[in-house]
Every structure is written in C-alpha cells, then in structure tokens.
Image: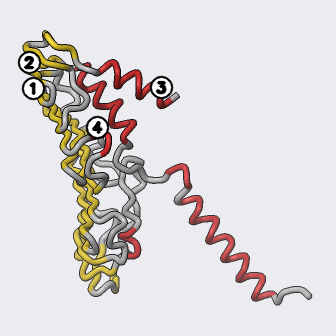
Amino acid sequence: SSLPTVARARLLTLAFSSSARQQQHPKSMAPMEVDSDEKFTQEAVRFLKEHCWLSSCCCFGLGCASPTPLVWSQSKVCCMQAQATSDEDCCGDMGWCMCTNKICCYVEHTQFPPDGCRIALCSIFCLGSAPEQPKDEDSLDVSYLEDACWLYYCCCEGAGCTSKCCDPMISGQQKVFCCFGKSMTGDCCGDRGIISLYSKVCCCVEYAQIPCGITPGIGLCGMMCCRGNLNEHEDGSASGSD
C-alpha cells in the first residue's frame, strides 16, 4: 500500500535536510588535529636543517634565521602539545581574534568580530544560536561547542559545559590577526620525548628536547664538531611515508 501524502512529504523533507547537512560538513573537510608524530619529525628535521645554530649542544641550541615567518613553533611538555604559526589570514572565517578553550567539561568561546551576535542564558538563546565548527581547515575539532550547555553568551563571548569531559581532556586554539595557535593533550612520552621545543620568533630560533632525540649535533656559529642525526631521521621518515 502506498504511504499517505503527508508521510511521503515528511520523508522527503528529512532526506533533503540530511543531504544539506552532509554538503555543509563534507568528510573531506574534517578539521585537522595537532600534527602526528611522523609529520612532527619531518617538521623538526626541516627546522633544524634550515637555520644557522650559534650554539648547539645535543639537546638544546640557539640560532638565527630569516624574519619570515614571523612566528612558528612546535612544543610538548609531558602530555601537553602545542603548535603556533603566523601564516593565517588576518581576518578569515575565525575573525580578527578568536579563542576556544576546553578543560574537562568547561568550555569557553570568544570571537571578534562575531559571525553573528549571540545572547543566551542557561543555554536558552534569545538571539543567534550556539557556535559552530569553524570552516578553516587548520581548526581543531570543536564540534562540542554545538552540543554544550551555555551558562551564558553575551555578543561575542560565552562559557558553558559539555558532556565530552575526556574527549579530549584539554583542548584550545587562539588566533590574533595572522597568528594562530592550538594545543591539546597527547602521549606523555612517545617519539617526541618528555619535553620538546622547536621555536622561531622573528630572527631568533631555539630547540630543546629531553631526552635527546633529533639534534644537529654539538657546535658553535654553524660549525658542528660532532654531527647530529638529522639525516637518519629524515631517511626514516621518508621511508615510513613510502
């Protein structure tokens, strides 16, 4: 027997809505997470090879570089990982300034200029709706914002709580004009060691890693009297990617 006209219309409406949501959030545009260990190794080797090290002693060093990019860093302390770069658009999908933080079940969100004015109290929005996942491909997965219970939201800033307490436990991303950074929890040790830092601000660069892992060696003013292991890690990452 054929379905009633009202039922058929309802099914068509649901199918159209599902298709529209899939087009808005395609799988190919899934948000990026903090770099994998393999990509981290490739970036660390490139960073150590490209710059001139004024002083280097196995697990730490200081050097100089060209002023561009203005900011770049990869860092890890125990289970906390972070990245930063200055290659973002000054005003893109995330606005001029943006901050999203999650600690356990507590979440907060700030964006200026906002993509839409929002006013809410106890998760009841009298103006606008809950923040959504940014379209920027460099953004972390902040889909928990859409399901959060907002204690308040006033124009461009709000705070609330989410049921996703440990998924991940800590996550955050911040943007100020062209500078963008993100952080989240990961393995306490792993291939990156307990502590690792590869940082560049303007013409100053530095690296540190405990225990000693990827290193250009021991030397002064770009002259290494004890060669490091950059070629070994570069060959290993290349063969692993193949």
Of the residues under marks 3 and 4, which one precedes in the sequence?
Answer: 4
Of the two numbered discs 2 and 3 in the rendering, the one whose residue sits closer to the viewer: 3
Q: Which residue is mark 2?
A: 54
The reply to whether dot 2 and dot 3 touch (C-beta < 8 Å) is: no
Of the residues under marks 3 and 1, which one precedes in the sequence?
Answer: 1
The amino acid beneath tag 1 is Leu
Q: State whether residue 215 is above or below residue 108.
A: above
**Residue 16's image quarter?**
bottom right
| Mark 2 to mark 3 CA distance (whole Å) | 31 Å
Of the residues under marks 2 and 3, which one precedes in the sequence?
Answer: 2
| Mark 3 to mark 1 CA distance (whole Å) | 30 Å
The amino acid beneath tag 2 is Leu
Kind of element beneath mark 3: helix
Of the residues under marks 2 and 1, which one precedes in the sequence?
Answer: 2
The reply to whether dot 2 and dot 4 touch (C-beta < 8 Å) is: no
| Mark 2 to mark 4 CA distance (whole Å) | 26 Å
Q: State whether residue 205 is above or below residue 25.
A: above
The reply to whether dot 4 and dot 1 touch (C-beta < 8 Å) is: no
> Pointer 4: residues within 10 angstroms few (<14), some, or many (20+)?
some
Of the two numbered discs 3 and 1 in the rendering, the one whose residue sits closer to the viewer: 3
Q: Please report the residue visible at 19 percent of the width from the left and 48 percent of the height from the top.
A: 77
Which image quarter holds the N terminus?
Answer: bottom right
Whether residue 181 is visible to the viewer of this picture, yes or no, is no
Residue 136 appears at what percent x and percent y?
A: 39, 50
Q: Which residue is mark 4?
A: 87
The reply to whether dot 3 and dot 1 touch (C-beta < 8 Å) is: no
Judge from the rendering whether residue 222 lies leftward or rightward of residue 185; answer left or right. Answer: left
The amino acid beneath tag 3 is Ser
Q: Please report the residue visible at 30 percent of the width from the left and 42 percent of the height from the top.
A: 89
| Mark 3 to mark 4 CA distance (whole Å) | 29 Å
Q: Which residue is mark 1?
A: 62
Q: Which residue is mark 3?
A: 239
